[in-house]
Structures are given as structure tokens and as C-alpha cells.
Image: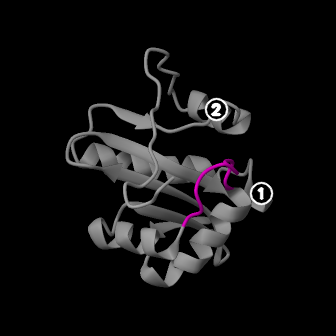
């Protein structure tokens, strides 16, 4: 199996949203929107990395840098392509991107009950940082 890795473009947004709907592991998160993905691509066109197998979208990861910290988000592999090396190829590219930007430390967002995701990150040398908790707030523009 040959995996092609490339940055996402605006023409990929619908495919990415579909991938996240079937390959994402967080049913409680707010819905992803085309506008949010387009804003990401507008701010950092190289951040959203896609993996394709035979022209089909197999996976994605966001390798973001906010000017201070280096983060990995939204690692998702379509169920039909899991355990075939897609995540490894994506993370190789994502980590290299962040190192090229100057990263000395990279963090990844992983749900506590995402056992599959945790095994991928652990295999890559990541570990849970127990002294931190994630605090979230809805959009200041919304009432919820």
C-alpha cells in the first residue's frame, strides 16, 4: 500500500469533514464546520496534512504552531485504513513540519477514553502529562 501525504486545500474541506465524522473519536465535541477548516487553511495552509491511498482520503492530522507552542490535533484515520501505517506516515510528516518550524516539544490532544488513539501516541513516544488538565469554554460569541 502506497500512502501519499500532502497539505489540504480548500477543495478537500468536504472530504475532511466526512473523514472526521467517520474516523473521529469524540462524539461530544462541537460539530466541525467548513468555515472553521477554511479559516485554518487561510491562517496556516500547511497545518492540515492529509494521507491518501489510491486517491482516497485515508487520514488527517493538524500540525499547528501558534507562535509559541507546537500542537497535534485531529489525528483521524478512516476505519477502512486503520492498522496499515497511515497514522505513522501522517505523524512522521507532522512531527517533521513542527521540528522544521523550531519545535523542541510537541503536545497532542488525546481523549481519555480513546484507547486506540492512546496506543498510537504511546508507540510514538508521547506520554500523558498528569499535572495538566484541559479547561474549555464555548465560543464567547455563543450563549452556551
Left or right: 39 with respect to 32?
left
As drawn, which residue projects farthest toward the bottom? Answer: 11
Q: Which residues are magenta?
A: 24-32
Decide whether residue 29 is among the magenta residues. Answer: yes
In the image, what residue occupies the spot 62% across and 54% down? 76
Q: Residues within 10 Å of mark 2 (few under 14, many from 20)?
A: some
In the image, what residue occupies the spot 66% across and 71% down? 18
Q: Is residue 1 visible?
A: no
Q: Quadrant of residue 42?
A: bottom left
Q: How many marks?
A: 2
Q: Quadrant of residue 38?
A: bottom left
Main secondary structure along the magenta-highlighted residues: loop
Decide whether residue 106 is among the magenta residues. Answer: no
Along the polypeptide, which appears first: circle 1 or circle 2? 1
Q: Position of residue 72 (x, y in %)?
A: 44, 45
Q: Please tell me which residue lies in front, 3 or 133.
A: 133
- Which labelled disc corresponds to residue 116? none
Q: Which residue is mark 1?
A: 79
In the image, what residue occupies the spot 49% across and 85% down? 11
Mark 1 residue element = helix
Q: Which residue is mark 2?
A: 118
| Relative vertical location of residue 95 with respect to residue 143 in this rendering, above or below | above
Q: Is residue 93 visible?
A: yes
Left or right: 125 with respect to 27?
left
| Relative vertical location of residue 110 with respect to residue 61 in this rendering, above or below | above
Left or right: 92 with respect to 45?
right
| Quarter containing the N terminus | bottom right
- Distance between the alpha carbons at the discs numbered 1 and 2: 16 Å
In the image, what residue occupies the spot 53% across and 70% down? 33
Amino acid at each position: 500500500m502506497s500512502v501519499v501525504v500532502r497539505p489540504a486545500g480548500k477543495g478537500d474541506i468536504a472530504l475532511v469533514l466526512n473523514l472526521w465524522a467517520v474516523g473521529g473519536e469524540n462524539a461530544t465535541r462541537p460539530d466541525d464546520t467548513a468555515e472553521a477548516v477554511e479559516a485554518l487553511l487561510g491562517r496556516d495552509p500547511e497545518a492540515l496534512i492529509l494521507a491518501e491511498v489510491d486517491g482516497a482520503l485515508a487520514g488527517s492530522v493538524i500540525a499547528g504552531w501558534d507562535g509559541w507552542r507546537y500542537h497535534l490535533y485531529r489525528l483521524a484515520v478512516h476505519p477502512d485504513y486503520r492498522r496499515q501505517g497511515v497514522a505513522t506516515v501522517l505523524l512522521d510528516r507532522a512531527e517533521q513540519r513542527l521540528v522544521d518550524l523550531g519545535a523542541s516539544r510537541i503536545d497532542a490532544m488525546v481523549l481519555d477514553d480513546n484507547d486506540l488513539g492512546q496506543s498510537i501516541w504511546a508507540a510514538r513516544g508521547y506520554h500523558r502529562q498528569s499535572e495538566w488538565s484541559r479547561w474549555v469554554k464555548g465560543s464567547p460569541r455563543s450563549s452556551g
